[in-house]
Image (cartoon, rainbow, N blue to C red):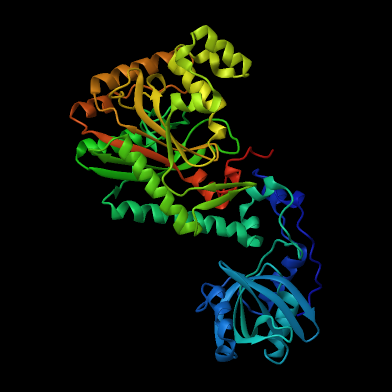
């Protein structure tokens, strides 16, 4: 059955908006709808249930390495059609699956006439088909499959551009990620690598005796980080609940309960600004080990990240734009106080609060009004003047107590806690402590946070009395660490935007 072809190119503006009007949203192509009816008229199911795919395209391409042996080999594969080229009795197209693309040839004479006409007139770029055929090379030496059988597996109804080199509108790529993935194999590779990253983390920790657990996403009391939560309401319980901002307090409850090595890879939710390194829904790995401290956690973090980079990147060096970052160990370790001296020439404890205020104003630092102590100024000035300079992996340790309500007081330095952060490319990658296990001190820290919250600090932590009571049963000396999966993926992929490594990043709704 012949149907006139009238493929229209998919522009960024033709992507539907996210509203509830289905008829306005639909971008089904009239010619494709006509071809769908043509397929049905021939008694062909355009959406069958199954296809026996025995060969991945990546494996097929490897067979051409020994073409003399594999020439004429029969294979059976499936994928999406791209770039159909019709030349009379021969039709060339590209067939792509998850891991690769290959040219196929549909030739009249290799198929029954009726099937050839069906392919010629009713099959489009974007359709998913299954084929059986033989390996051959064209006169130009291009690896190809000569099709002897084909099955339509999914008839596409939305027109794809014949010549596609990536959507021009970056927002469209984020909102309609499936289009980005359909056309850009290199984008798919990012998320394949991300999947391998979490698998490697699990392997690394399992080999060292850590157990993976799941903690609640919906919580009565939020905690574990200084962040503003998302809230929801449970109709049956008739109470407000909070989306998890961190799994920390629950994982430490597990250590109280007797598990000595625990971790979780999870989604956290923080009602905060969106920028190139922040998304309100993000992925973290948190790990806790009894009878350890923050020095052990720095060692663990260094070993873990270095091994991940080498295994997934093949080298300790990664490219970030014009920068080359070397993650070969050992990594630099320096206290926050000394880092401010080294990178900004500033000794916080040699200045009065009024002098520090003037320094902050001179450097156009907006948050200085929150600072009520030299320790708080240390943290604010470090963030503004030092962080972006930490390109190669650097552990910053020994934080002021005011900014670390869950970390243990420093064993030698009053006013400080045993806390560290790992920085790479100027970004915070990981955060760890010697965990505070004194229930009375924890209660005092929570009360100080609660005062800040009542004075308008929406990111201050709330008092979790159940957690305090859990500590009352005894938490052994414990080291803990949280690692940002999204930012680590950015480093491995050499990308500067978190939206590039999250499949479906949060976007403002289109009206």
Above or below for 128 versus 429: below
Residue at 37% from the left image edge and 15% from the top image edge: 448
Is there any visible trace of residue 275 in the rendered image?
Answer: yes
In the rendered picture of this protein, how many numbered marks are placed on residues? 0
Above or below for 230 versus 23: above
- Which sits in the foreground, 67 or 303? 303
Q: Position of residue 427 (x, y in %)?
A: 53, 37
Q: Position of residue 410 (x, y in %)?
A: 31, 24
- Which sits in the foreground, 180 or 126? 180
Q: Position of residue 113 (x, y in %)?
A: 72, 89
Position of residue 56 in the picture relative to residue 28 (left or right):
left
Position of residue 310 in the picture relative to residue 386 (left or right):
left
Q: Quadrant of residue 435?
A: top left
Is there any visible trace of residue 457 in the rendered image?
Answer: no
Position of residue 118 in the picture relative to residue 63 (left or right):
right
Residue at 54% from the left image edge and 15% from the top image edge: 368
Quadrant of the drawing holding the N terminus: bottom right
Position of residue 225 in the picture relative to residue 1 (left or right):
left
Above or below for 218 versus 203: above
Quadrant of the drawing holding the C terminus: top right
- Which sits in the foreground, 33 or 299? 299
Residue at 39% from the left image edge and 49% from the top image edge: 304
Q: Quadrant of residue 78?
A: bottom right
Q: Position of residue 275 (x, y in %)?
A: 60, 35
Above or below for 168 versus 275: below
């Amino acid at each position: 059955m012949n149907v006139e072809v009238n493929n229209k190119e998919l522009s960024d503006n033709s992507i539907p908006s996210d509203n509830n009007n289905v008829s306005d949203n639909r971008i089904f192509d009239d010619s494709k709808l006509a071809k769908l009816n043509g397929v049905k008229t021939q008694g062909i199911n355009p959406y069958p249930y199954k296809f026996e795919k025995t060969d991945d395209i990546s494996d097929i391409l490897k067979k051409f390495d020994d073409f003399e042996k594999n020439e004429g080999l029969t294979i059976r594969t499936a994928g999406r059609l791209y770039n159909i080229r019709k030349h009379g009795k021969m039709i060339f197209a590209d067939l792509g699956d998850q891991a690769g693309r290959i040219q196929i040839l549909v030739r009249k004479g290799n198929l029954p006439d009726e099937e050839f006409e069906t392919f010629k007139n009713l099959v489009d770029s974007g359709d998913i088909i299954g084929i059986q055929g033989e390996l051959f090379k064209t006169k130009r030496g291009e690896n190809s499959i000569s099709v002897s059988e084909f099955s339509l597996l999914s008839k596409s109804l939305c027109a794809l551009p014949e010549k596609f080199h990536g959507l021009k509108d970056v927002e469209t790529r984020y909102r309609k990620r499936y289009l980005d993935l359909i056309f850009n194999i290199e984008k798919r590779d990012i998320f394949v690598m991300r999947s391998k990253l979490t698998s490697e983390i699990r392997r690394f920790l399992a080999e060292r005796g850590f157990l993976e657990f799941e903690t609640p996403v919906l919580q009565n009391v939020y905690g574990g980080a200084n962040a503003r939560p998302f809230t929801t309401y449970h109709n049956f319980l008739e109470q407000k609940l909070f989306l998890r901002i961190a799994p920390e307090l629950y994982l430490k409850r597990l250590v109280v309960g007797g598990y000595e090595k625990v971790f979780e890879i999870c989604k956290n939710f923080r009602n905060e600004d969106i920028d190139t390194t922040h998304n309100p829904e993000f992925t973290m790995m948190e790990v806790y080990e009894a009878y350890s401290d923050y020095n052990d956690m720095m060692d663990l973090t260094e070993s873990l990240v270095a091994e991940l980079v080498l295994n997934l990147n093949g080298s300790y060096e990664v490219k970030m734009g014009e920068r080359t970052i070397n993650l070969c160990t050992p990594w630099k370790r320096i206290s926050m106080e000394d880092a401010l001296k080294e990178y900004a020439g500033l000794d916080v404890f040699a200045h009065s609060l009024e002098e520090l205020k003037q320094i902050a104003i001179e450097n156009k630092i907006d948050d200085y009004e929150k600072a009520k102590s030299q320790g708080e100024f240390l943290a604010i000035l470090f963030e503004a003047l030092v962080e972006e300079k930490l390109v190669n992996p650097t552990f910053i340790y020994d934080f002021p107590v005011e900014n670390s309500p869950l970390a243990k007081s420093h064993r030698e330095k009053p006013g400080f806690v045993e806390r560290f952060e790992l920085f790479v490319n100027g970004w915070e990658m990981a955060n760890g402590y010697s965990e505070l296990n004194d229930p009375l001190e924890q209660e005092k820290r929570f009360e100080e946070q609660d005062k800040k919250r009542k004075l308008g600090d929406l990111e201050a932590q709330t008092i979790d009395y159940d957690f305090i009571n859990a500590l009352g049963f005894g938490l052994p000396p414990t080291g803990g660490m949280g690692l940002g999966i999204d930012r680590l993926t950015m480093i491995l992929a050499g990308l500067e935007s978190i939206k590039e490594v999250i499949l479906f990043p949060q976007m403002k709704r289109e009206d």
